[in-house]
Amino acid sequence: MEHQPPPFFKTGPTPLARLLIFTALSVTVLVADARFNYLPTLRQVVAVMVYPLQRIASAPAGIVRRVGEFFVTQSSLRADNARLREESLANASALQQIPALQAENRQLRDLLAVRERLEVRVVAAETLYAAHDPFSRKIVVDKGSQQGIRAGQPVIDQSGVIGQVTRAYPWLSEVTLITDKGQLVPVQNLRNGLRAVLAGTGNDGTLELRFVPLNADYQNGDRLVTSGIDGVYPPGLPVAQVSNVIRNAAQPFARIAGTPLAGVASYAHVLIVQGQRDLPPRPPDEDQPARTRKPRKN
């Protein structure tokens, strides 16, 4: 009776069998996430496990940046100090007018019986990196649910609206920029008060107003701010400036392009707005009148 020696290398399943196994596993995970929403908890666990690796991976870049900041020459610091001193003197007169304008604004609101807007609370965050998906405009910041961040909160910088928090992990948050194709922001024209919906185009430097009639009064240079009617974005935040208006009688709507005012392509530090307006509940829909039946003709 002959005995063959065992193979030196164990080959395991064939490549085709491995392909079928991993394909079935991928389809199962996709169906479980899309139909039954089983994976948010798994994402939270994976985010907690991967967080130390993300910090380690970003450590070399942080060390290089800090070393570069350490070797800044004294002459550049003096130049920056002189420039800031000149800007402070130039803005001193404007800053002195702010208390008077605030007092006048409060007086007018009391006379018109307009409800005071609630002050919002913000959390400062630092941008860690941008998403690698070329078809989306997203960034990741270093604040998460442990700091009270949750999905839906607006994100701004010193110039205006940047985007909105779409996913919040324990120590990280994903922010979708207003230039993303799926992002919509209700806005209002400061010049005439017209309201519209501003949508992203997938390009960091371009936004567009959707479903605007041809006779709507929009001009190049108009500034668009948040209208606040959605209850998400506080009213009055700068968003974009109209850069191009095209009206074609063959089209049902005008084509209006805008340029974002915030630094959506040069972000470093951002503010996450946590406070939201307390809006009254929506009134119930009125019952539809019952249809009267017409008598049948004999």
Image (cartoon, rainbow, N blue to C red):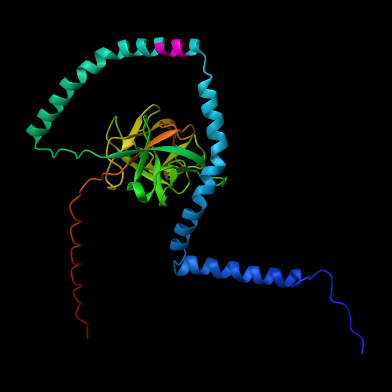
Residue at horizontal 59 percent and vertical 66 percent from the top:
26
Quadrant location, the N terminus = bottom right
Q: Is residue 38 above or below residue 100?
A: below
Outermost right residue:
2
Residue at horizontal 84 percent and vertical 73 percent from the top:
7
Outermost left residue:
111
Quadrant location, the C terminus = bottom left
Q: Is residue 161 visible?
A: yes
* Front residue of this view, candidates 193 and 78: 78
Using residue 197 as the reference point, say whether residue 297 is left or right of it.
left
Residue 192 position by quadrant: top left
Residue 89: % across, % down? 31, 10
Residue at horizontal 49 percent and vertical 34 percent from the top:
265
Total labels drawn: 0
Q: Main secondary structure of the magenta part?
A: helix
Residue at horizontal 79 percent and vertical 71 percent from the top:
10
* Front residue of this view, candidates 228 and 61: 61
- 174 part of magenta stretch: no
Residue 204: % across, % down? 50, 36
Q: Is residue 210 visible?
A: no
Using residue 196 as the reference point, say whether residue 95 is left or right of it.
left
* Front residue of this view, candidates 193 and 231: 231
Using residue 279 as the reference point, say whether residue 259 is left or right of it.
right
* Front residue of this view, candidates 150 and 215: 150
In the image, the segment drawn in magenta is 77-81
Residue 94: % across, % down? 25, 16
Residue 165: % across, % down? 39, 47
- 79 part of magenta stretch: yes
Residue 112 position by quadrant: top left
Outermost bottom residue:
1
